[in-house]
Image (cartoon, rainbow, N blue to C red):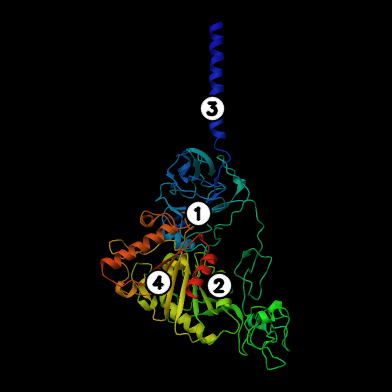
Amino acid sequence: MMLGRWLHEQRWIVLILALNLWSSNAWSQAPAAMQITGVVHGGLAGAPKALECFVLEDIDDLSEFGLGTANNGSGSAGVEWTFPPMAVQAGEFLYVSKESEIFASFFGFEADFIDDGLACNFNGDDAIELFQNDWAIDAFGDPNQDGSGFDWEYTLGWAWRSCESMPSAVFNGADWTVSMGAIGASETNAAAMIPFPAGEFANPCIELLPGCTESHADNYNPLANEEDGSCSYVQFFSAAGCTYDQAINFDAQALFDDGTCEWSSTNPCPADLNDNGLVDVSDVLLMLTAFGQSCPEEDAVFLTGTGQFVFDGYAPFADTPINLHYHVPAGLTSDAPVVMVFHGNNRNASEYRDHWISIADAMGLLIVAPEFTSSGFPGSEEYMQGGVFNADGVERPVTQWTFALVEPMLATFQDSTGNADPKMDLWGHSAGGQFVHRFMLFHGSELVDRAVAANSGWYTVPDLPIAYPYGLLDAPVNGRTLDEALPSQLIISLGTADTNPIGPIHNPDVDLQGFNRFDRGQYFWELSQNTAESQALELNWNLMEVQGVGHDASGMANAIAVWLFP
């Protein structure tokens, strides 16, 4: 009896020790630094199949995390795909997709990681798990249940996590919004019956107020924090008038100056007390508020606004309106330099224009930023890669490339402003940098003086053995040749702190260029030099490193402006 009792007690001791060990390991994973925030199941040849994850805390080694799919309620499959080793910061979104092309075309931006279906092999009734060091830390759906017919089924639709809900290995349907069939066979997220709210998860919750967030629109709502596409510019010019408070027809309600100011004397700038054509130091004691401003000419225009461009002859997107966001400083002369600014992957052209406003005012530049919407120019192929190939992979005529819109957009803009500068400069950042460097490589223009590609996510390198779009093998043949492209003035502008691997696309082909934007730019520059040297070609491309600046459009714009317009 004593021996039996002793053995019974030993079994309990072993069980308690085992439970303590399990508890210790389980708690070592908490709190989780990442969670699943979205699952997308599209109907375009089984794609997009993608996951959105949100980083809750800084992660030094992302390879500790992995994903797996529990198919048909068969139970957890464990880790089927592991994130690459890299550091990520709190607040970042990570997108993992089965493939790259349909994802980019559908969402208008590129996935961060491609797993080739290792984890993104789910149907709309399968559960997905997120692991850290092989421990499940978060789940959507029940791994032990086939979701068909249950309220978490997301076939041809999506699931989205409610704000402030925390990661849990035990699925709680109350934490999720599920919209089965919301995507169907839609070719783009914007065209879906209910678009997936990509990048909108917030922790803590942010109350969204839809409205027009463009400050120069007729119906601008300063309280709105979610752009709803309602901005109108019909009455834009009615907001213009004389904004100089010492003019006899000063309009206190005018938002922009339209050059109609009338003066009581022959001096068109009353603040210029010494009549030297400039409000300068000699006037500062009397006119502190006007110090440093150039005096306007009688026909000066001071406008920051948006117009539209439609090129009827552009076959792939005939009659597709392109918003031209512009800034014309006061007193601008007809031969003032023009800078055409190309936005990033968020298609936020008005913000990119705004980065240049203070620069334009100080240096006398005319700024125009065309907006290539994801609906009009979907995916990387139609915007960043210039629309050179159609959906079937057939090269379009050069006149039908997206690149071909640059010259007519400039002509339209110059006609509307009276500008006659025979040349223009191009500046593109991030996705816009991709557009610019490929424009100069494959298309070019006699109207372009200098072109700047800043912080591009990845490049088409001038190397024949590398397949297009990463190199020149099977690249478009009807545009420029290398001996025409390399002598042009192209500046590769790189922020030395743009080293975060999150953001640019990752796949085996593009990762040969490096794992972040700075390294990829260095790779492109070095390979371009080697190509020019090996083929005895003239190379007028240059490299500009901006010390201490990361993926910051404003910082890169200020740095290049000092170089281009000293």
Residue bearing the label numbered 2 = 356
Element marked by disc 3: helix
Residues tagged 2 and 1 counted as in contact (Cβ below 8 A): no
The N terminus lies in quadrant: top right
Of label 3 and label 2, which has the lower sequence position? Answer: 3
The image position of residue 502, as x and y in percent, is 48, 54
Q: Is residue 458 left or right of residue 11?
A: left
Residues tagged 4 and 1 counted as in contact (Cβ below 8 A): no
Disc number at residue 490? 4
Cα distance, mark 3 to mark 2? Answer: 59 Å
Q: Residues within 10 Å of mark 3 (few under 14, many from 20)?
A: few
Amino acid at pointer 2: Trp
Extreme residue toward the top, this view? 1
Total number of numbered discs in the rendering: 4
Element marked by disc 1: strand
Disc number at residue 21? 3
Of label 3 and label 4, which has the lower sequence position? Answer: 3
Amino acid at pointer 4: Leu
Kindly identify the residue that appears in the image at 63 percent across and 49 percent down: 164
Residues tagged 4 and 2 counted as in contact (Cβ below 8 A): no
